[in-house]
């Protein structure tokens, strides 16, 4: 199961590129984003390694099982509900962001509400699958899409209109002191590891060191692509103006002899499944947390209630939140997420220590 | 209600909400022109060229609808009332500004409007039209099979590849207008007797058109931007001259201080090619000499071009951006603005003549 650990992180890195992180980093590009990225790489890697080592001590157990062994029932319910909310919001933010993109570029004449419905249908179907099946699905989708997305990123790197001097110009602002916001946004590239809290059930062996080496290099490449490629193409002074910098960057590429000249539609198509899967994985984890309260099995009625809450919240959010508010929410959410990540690593640490006694 | 029932309900809801317009209810704009308005109370004359699809016998059919307004958005609103179908900009691949607009009424909203719209391609080409943008839209070259395709082909560098065309995409124009140290440039389309001709470039400062280059200067700029390698270099030996057909041209530049601490930009040009035509009998033993002659003449031409740009205080190559990218000070842009007029250019050229064609 070792490679699935890498897939989970890779999935997060890929969704990282398109929706909020580039915008948040680019607005801070002269005020510490460069240093923020440089700090985020070792820091994110440290969190990943720390967490994996800790969870490796309790193989084949998810957070709900661990909690019931070590803490009382009340603490367990409280923690699980809290965790489910975090994972639900993580998925929801990605879903809202991608819906907005689809709505703008592919079907502007339909209301977002109607666009949400088929997405919800697919996601609610996928999150009921067993964790193992979901992992297989993850592998399939990554194998199918990652090379194609990689090709588009390659086209961006080799574009004639990518000005390396603009990249260097922003890089020379490395001395600016980073804000917490930039570090939080940049560490999101690593956050895929948090899903192990549930998927640890499938992991029999310990996570190999080679994974961390791969993650280190992938993270450098990913953050460079997220942050510097839009700068190279849209300029050191102009890149911060776009709402979705990477989508506009994909629109600025041209495959002359390709079946479709405008790369953006290929890009969105490839990303459709990746984003939906990212949402599904987050919501699957949330669902498993909620299931954990009832000891792992829930009745159909309970499931229906949970799904109604998930759908109700998404519909409410789609109707009420517009794109600009969404970016603000995402900024705040990413910062809270980093604090949350550090605290749950501490929680896992406590659990592991109690188990040893 | 079971889960399956809910899914069915969701699908039914979907059927009602689809608002997609069919292709036969859309009018595809292929290019757009912005001219000065003749009416003194309005600023611009916006013209949109629509392709008429599916005309089997006459393939190159189009209509042009124009409207005067202060902003593009207002004009488009009125144009919508003049056509019977939904105006669709997703196929618009050329935005043409007239020379007068570029000189006198260039304003940021002209390139922000298309960037802001989701349907307008970021990879649409932007160009200057002479004598007016409307004339360029009206031109109907005989070889053109699809409306405005002549313009598209000459910019796409798919049909003919020449060093006299420097295509500019919308996103790059917007970048160049905002990037300190990299100034905008737009290719100039001239139209005469239903033909279009693109072989010059207009250079902008951050506000408006400053100078139009000659075709030879355009070629120098192209070399410096490393855009096109297939070119011809004319080498002067008095009355007798010869032409080199290049298949590789590469330029590099570097900023440095010379031994007297004066700012210098060091440009090195490397070209390889073959002799294509000469007005005198070529002697293969003298190839080294020809190479040197060619290098010398290119050096002079390049240097003159660089000095011309410096005097006009425009920087389409991005020396300023290079300086900003290689210096850590926060005020490096202010320093560069002071430095640029004092910079001296050193040009090193290395031309390699690989062969003299099929004839020795």
Image (cartoon, helix red, strand yellow):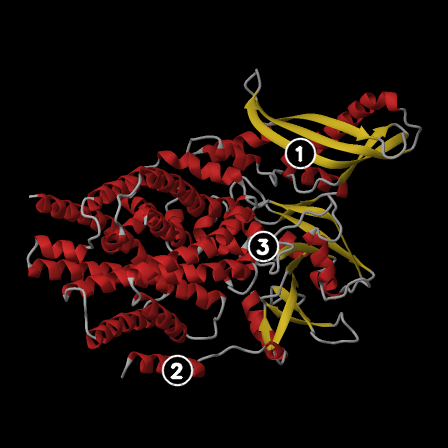
Q: Position of residue A184 (x, y in %)?
A: 29, 47
Residue A19 falls left or right of residue B284: left
| Residue closest to the far front | A204
Report the mark closest to the observer, 3 or 2: 2
Which residue occupies the foreground of this view, A23 or A135? A135
User: Image point 44% across, 83% down: which residue?
Assistant: B16
Q: Position of residue A110 (x, y in %)?
A: 45, 75
| Residue A119 visible (yes or no) | yes
Residue carrying label 3: B170
Query: How far apart are the two marked residues, 2 and 1, measured between alpha carbons?
Result: 60 Å
Residue carrying label 2: B13
Disc with the residue nearer the chain's start (3 vs 2): 2
Which residue occupies the foreground of this view, B44 or B173? B173
Which residue occupies the foreground of this view, A114 or A201? A201
Q: Secondary structure at mark 3?
A: helix
Q: Disc 2 vs disc 1: Cβ atoms closer than 8 Å?
A: no
Disc with the residue nearer the chain's start (1 vs 3): 3
Report the mark closest to the observer, 2 or 1: 2
User: Image point 91% across, 30% down: which residue?
Assistant: B239
Crowding at dot 1, Cα within 10 Å, few <14 / some 14-19 / many 20+, comes out as some
Q: Disc 1 vs disc 3: Cβ atoms closer than 8 Å?
A: no
Q: Disc 3 vs disc 2: Cβ atoms closer than 8 Å?
A: no
Residue carrying label 1: B250
Q: Chain of mark 3?
A: B
Residue B324 falls left or right of residue B191: left
Q: Chain of mark 2?
A: B
């Amino acid at each position: 199961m070792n490679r699935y650990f890498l897939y989970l992180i890779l999935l997060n890195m890929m969704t990282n590129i398109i929706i909020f992180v580039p915008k948040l980093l680019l607005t801070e590009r002269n005020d510490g984003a460069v240093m923020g990225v440089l700090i985020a790489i070792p820091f994110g890697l440290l969190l990943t390694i720390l967490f994996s080592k800790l969870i490796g001590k309790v193989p084949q157990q998810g957070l709900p099982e661990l909690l019931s062994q070590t803490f009382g029932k009340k603490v367990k319910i409280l923690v699980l509900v809290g965790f489910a909310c975090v994972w639900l919001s993580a998925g929801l933010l990605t879903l809202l962001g991608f819906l907005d993109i689809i709505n703008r570029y592919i079907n502007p004449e339909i209301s977002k509400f109607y666009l949400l419905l088929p997405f919800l249908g697919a996601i609610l179907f996928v999150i009921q699958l067993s964790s193992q099946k979901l992992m297989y699905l993850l592998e399939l989708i990554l194998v199918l899409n990652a090379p194609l997305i990689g090709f588009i990123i390659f086209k961006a790197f080799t574009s004639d209109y990518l000005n390396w001097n603009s990249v260097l110009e922003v890089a020379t602002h490395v001395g600016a002191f980073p804000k917490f916001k930039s570090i939080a946004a940049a560490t999101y590239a690593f956050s895929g590891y948090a899903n192990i809290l549930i998927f640890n059930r499938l992991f029999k062996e310990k996570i190999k060191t080679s994974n961390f080496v791969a993650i280190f290099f992938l993270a450098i490449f990913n953050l460079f692509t997220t942050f510097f490629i839009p700068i190279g193409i849209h300029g050191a002074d102009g890149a911060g103006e776009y709402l979705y910098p990477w989508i506009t960057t994909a629109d600025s590429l041209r495959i002359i002899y390709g079946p479709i000249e405008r790369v953006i539609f290929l890009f969105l198509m490839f990303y459709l499944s990746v984003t939906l899967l990212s949402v599904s994985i987050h919501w699957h984890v949330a669902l498993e947390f909620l299931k954990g309260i009832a000891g792992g099995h829930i009745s159909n009625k309970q499931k229906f209630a949970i799904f109604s809450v998930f759908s109700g919240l998404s519909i409410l959010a789609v109707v009420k939140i517009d794109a600009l508010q969404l970016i603000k929410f995402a900024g705040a959410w990413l910062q809270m997420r980093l604090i949350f990540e550090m605290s749950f690593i501490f929680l896992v640490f406590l659990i592991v220590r109690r188990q040893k006694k | 209600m079971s889960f399956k029932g809910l899914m069915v309900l969701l699908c039914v809801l979907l059927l009602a909400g689809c608002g997609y317009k069919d292709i036969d209810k859309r009018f595809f704009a292929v290019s757009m022109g912005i001219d000065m308005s003749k009416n003194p109370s309005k600023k611009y004359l916006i013209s949109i060229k629509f392709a008429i699809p599916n005309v089997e016998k006459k393939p190159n059919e189009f209509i042009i609808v124009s409207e005067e307004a202060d902003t593009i958005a207002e004009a488009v609103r009125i144009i919508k009332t003049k056509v019977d179908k939904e105006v669709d900009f997703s196929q618009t691949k050329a935005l043409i500004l007239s020379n007068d607009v570029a000189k006198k009424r260039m304003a940021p909203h002209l390139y922000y409007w298309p960037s802001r719209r989701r349907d307008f391609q970021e990879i649409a080409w932007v160009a200057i039209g002479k004598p007016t943008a409307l004339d360029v839209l009206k031109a109907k070259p005989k070889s053109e099979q699809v409306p405005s395709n002549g313009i598209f082909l000459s910019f796409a560098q798919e049909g003919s590849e020449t060093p006299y065309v420097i295509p500019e995409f919308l996103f790059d124009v917007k970048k160049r207008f905002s990037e300190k140290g990299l100034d905008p440039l737009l290719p100039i389309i001239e139209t005469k007797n239903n033909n279009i001709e693109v072989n010059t470039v207009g250079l902008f400062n951050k506000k408006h058109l400053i100078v139009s280059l000659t075709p030879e200067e355009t070629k120098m700029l192209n070399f410096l931007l490393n855009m096109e390698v297939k070119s011809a270099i004319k080498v002067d030996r008095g009355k007798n001259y010869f032409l080199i057909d290049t298949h590789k041209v590469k330029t590099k530049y570097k900023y440095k201080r010379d031994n007297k601490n004066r700012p210098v930009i060091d440009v090195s040009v490397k070209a390889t090619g073959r002799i294509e035509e000469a007005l005198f009998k070529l002697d293969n033993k003298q190839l080294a000499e020809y190479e040197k002659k060619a290098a010398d003449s290119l050096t002079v031409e390049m240097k003159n071009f660089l000095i011309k740009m410096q005097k006009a205080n425009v920087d389409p190559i991005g020396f300023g951006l290079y300086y900003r990218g290689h210096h850590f000070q926060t005020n490096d842009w202010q320093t560069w603005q002071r430095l640029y007029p004092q910079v001296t250019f050193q040009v090193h050229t290395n031309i390699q003549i690989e062969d003299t064609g099929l004839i020795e």
